[in-house]
Image: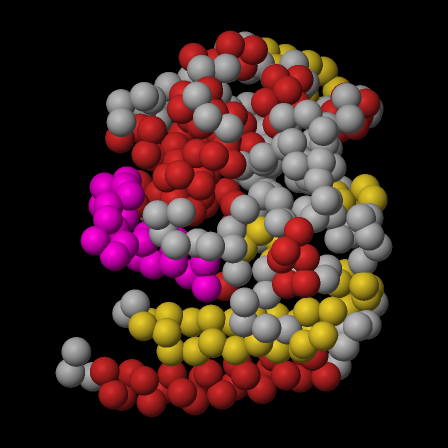
Amino acid sequence: THNDTAHHTLSRDRLAKLDAVMKQYITDGKLGGAVIKINQHGREVFSEAYGWRDREAGVAMQEDTIFRIASQTKALTSVSIMMLMEEGKLVLEDPVGKFLPEWQKTTVAVAKEKGGYDVVPAKRPITIRDLLSHTAGVSYGTGPGEKAWRDAGIFGWYFADKDVPVSSVVSKMAKLPMAAQPGEQWVYGYNTDILGVVVEKLSGKSLDVFLKERLIDPLGMTDTAFCLPPEKTNRLAVVYSAVDGKAERAPSPGKWEGSGHIGQGHYAGGPCKAFAGGAGLLSTAHDYSRFLEMLRQGGTFEGRRYISPASVDLMSH
């Protein structure tokens, strides 16, 4: 474009600022380490590693360091659902109960004025679209019915320590009272984990295999998986928690605290049984940028089409 040079001059200034802020974060101990990669118009304009992969061992962060990408996993699962939609296996208005029978009828917890809650039937079935947009009323266990979720042992986003598949946990969820009526409000929670089970059901493959065959391998995401291969243990970033404004090494493997799992997790050494569509993949900045570039290009990358521009449009508006 005609203003390309001006555009990049402006960027250089801002990139220098970004660089300075990141270095300051490391110096102040607010952050253990980070990898930042910025692509513009499909070209890399910035790539830098900051701080430590393992501060205590004095090992610097590298650009190919592997991170737990947590909820960024959701985007790959959502693309998988769009792939299945394009194959005619589902429509977005389908009730999830069509594929996972225990979800045909669900309930909602409604808080009582004097404490406790009532359980009422859902006004309508939860749809695939509800799950994709986190408007199904499905939380991570919080809400008026929190006690029921905690008693059932289903709470928080973390699945890597479970030695059962996600599908067995998701079928139990259906019986618990949701945090809101379907379609009435935005509630962040297990929505995409449920969609991961739908992907498994409709494809006849476990989620790790489906993602690998349809997205990870074709996109050249060579370091993206649910479990860390033993030969890559020296590339996994250490988790640091923010404690009083400072980055503190989290325990290994860690434990449940409050609303989630605090710690290094069970990504190296297993059990490697629960492939959670909502949070669970490991990846690198390089790998994830390839996935994002496919979406930026309207569903195509390096001559291969993954989903249609119409699907990308639906996802991003």
Give 104 or 35, whichever is nearer the viewer. 35
Q: Is residue 26 left or right of residue 207?
A: right
- Residue 257, placed above or below residue 119: below
Spot occupied by residue 223 in the image (x, y as percentages of width and height): 51, 55
**Quick check: 219 left or right of 271?**
left
The answer to whether residue 259 shows anywhere in this view is yes
Residue at 45%, 84% in the rendered image: 14
Residue segment shown in magenta = 286-311
**Residue 110 x/y as whole percent:** 68, 22
Name the residue nearer the viewer: 277 or 127. 277
Nearer the observer, 51 or 315: 51
Relative to residue 244, is residue 110 drawn left or right? Answer: left
Residue shown at 81% from the left, 66% from the top: 248
Q: Position of residue 178 (x, y in %)?
A: 63, 23
180 shown above or below 222: above
Q: Is residue 62 magenta?
A: no
Q: Residue at x 59, y 22 (%)?
A: 167
